[in-house]
Structure formats: C-alpha cells, structure tokens
Image (cartoon, rainbow, N blue to C red):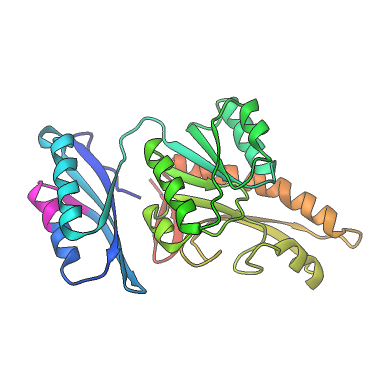
Amino acid sequence: MISDLSARNQLLEFSVIGKDRKGIVSEITSYVFQNKGNIEQISQNVASGWFMMHLEASFPRESFQKERFETDLLRLSKLLNLEIKIHYQNKEKKRMAVFVTKEDHCLRSILETWKQNRLKVEIPVIISSRKDLEPTAAEYGVPFYKINFSDPQKREKAITALLEKKNIDFIVLARYMKILSPSFVWRYPNRIINVHPSLLPAFPGAFAYTQAYERGVKLVGCSVHFVTPDLDQGPIICQDAFRVHPKDTLKTIRSKGQKLEAKLLLKGINLFLEGKLEVYWGKVGLKTQ
C-alpha cells in the first residue's frame, strides 16, 4: 500500500505491461522524475517475454496538471509500445468491484453489510460469468454485468475496460470460479482479494472441502488472501477454522465453511479499507500505527 503522505501530494499507481526490452524501467522512472514525482514503491517481473511493472508515486499537488500528465503519458505509452495505466488514490470512499459465479453466500453478506452502512465502500458493479446472481444484485440495486467470452483474453479485455470505466480501486472475488491471467492480476497488485475454502497452503483449487472431507481432517478452515499469478498462493490476510465432528458429512462441512467464508471475507475487506494491511516479501502484516 502507498505510505501515508501529506494532503499536498497527488498519489498515483502505474501499471505497465508490454513486450520486454532493455531500458523500460529507466524511461518510466525518468518520466516520473521529470514531472517532479517521488517513487514510493516499485516492483517488476518478466515472464514469457512480457514485462510487467507496478509503480507507486507521489507528485506535488500544486504543480500537478492531470490532463497534461495523462496526455504525455499516453504519448509515452505509444512511443514505447506499452500499456500504461494510471490509478488515482485520492477518493473518500474506495470503489469495489465484486466478481461472482453462482454461490451467493459471500455476495449476500457483502451487500447486506453494505446496505446497513457497515461497509464503507462504493460498489459500482458486480461482474459474473453467469446470470445466476443477477436477481441478488438487482435486489440491492447494484449494476450486474455478465461477461463470459469463451476466449479468456477477450473476456479479460472486456472486464478491464469496464473496471476502468467505473474507476475501480480494488476487486473482491466472492467465490468467482474463473482463473485470472497473470497480466490481469498484475494490473491490480495487492488489490484483488479472494476467499478460499481451506487453510492455505493446504488444499488449493476448486474442491477444497471435498479434499478435506476425503482426507479426514479434524480442522477445516478458510483463508482470505491477495491474488497473485500463482493460484491460491498469494499473501494471506486472515484465516479461521472450525472443528469437524464425527457425524459431519461433506454437506455439513460445506455449509459451515460457507458461513465462515462470508464472515472472514468481510473481515479481510474491512482491514483493506481501513488501510491496516502492508505486504512485504510475500507476507501481509498489520500496521501498528
């Protein structure tokens, strides 16, 4: 997360994606410095010939000209043949997109808490690969979009365009059953929150409760974590568990787990919204201040 800065500063996040070549980092950072920016954090990765960079920077508000800055950055992105996106950090309420598939327990928990004004966030959009939960979204007055092109690249391109249009700050996967590509995840570093039905790193994947039941585990839990390109391997925000009784069936274990998922996901969202999370070396810590 961006460090606490004076209200005099404009806070920005950049995501940069494109074919790898020499000099990209230098050209992007030089652009920041030329505009009197201060780099707060930077990370980069190269995979299969693709370059991905996330950069957080602050600029003196009194001299920052948004339109000129964005025009110049667009020119630079075309010159370098890179996708460069800007995300602004200065909003009173963060804007959250919720991704769902067909299970409604996490979505209902989020929307009911939000309706009661106990979740200090805006929810401009719910995105799904199916129409099952469209009535639930309508019940709470939140726009619902079904985006499920068979081509994953086409699907993610449509989703990305919608998120940019809605100026989304972060994403919550409320039992969304599509795998996100590394390039998509890289656009939202430490800003995609997922709930997984196991005490990670045990039982990754889509059938965690079934695996736990078949292995006869005595404790079943849930994990809320930031999403990374590695499936179910992201930094863990919070975890909780319940005991399995001898008479429990797969059905009762799943029912107990879903209740815990909804509760724990809300906890993770609130920790994020309160700015209490810091990610260092693949681990999530709580800010002490």
Instruction: Name the spot of residue 34 as percent of width and height, x first.
Output: 7, 50
Q: Residue furthest right?
A: 247
Task: Name the residue nearer the viewer: 259 or 170.
Answer: 170
Instruction: Name the spot of residue 248 as percent of width and height, x first.
Output: 87, 58
Task: Name the residue nearer the viewer: 204 or 143.
Answer: 143
Instruction: Name the spot of residue 84 as percent of width and height, x first.
Output: 26, 52
Left or right: residue 280 versus residue 23 is: right
The residue that appears at 87% across and 59% down in the rendered structure is: 249
The residue that appears at 26% across and 44% down in the rendered structure is: 12
Quadrant where the C terminus sits is top left
Q: Is residue 93 magenta?
A: no
Task: Name the residue nearer the viewer: 244 or 231.
Answer: 231
The residue that appears at 64% across and 35% down in the rendered structure is: 134
Q: Which residues are magenta?
A: 30-39
In this picture, is 127 found above or below 214? above
Left or right: residue 49 versus residue 244 is: left
The quadrant in which residue 223 appears is bottom right
In this picture, is 285 found above or below 72? below
Q: Is residue 38 magenta?
A: yes
Instruction: Name the spot of residue 279 as percent of width and height, x first.
Output: 40, 58
Q: How many numbered tags mark residues here?
A: 0
The quadrant in which residue 240 appears is bottom right
The residue that appears at 42% across and 54% down in the rendered structure is: 190
Task: Name the residue nearer the viewer: 153 or 97.
Answer: 153
The quadrant in which residue 142 appears is top right
Q: Residue furthest left?
A: 34
Left or right: residue 217 versus residue 232 is: right
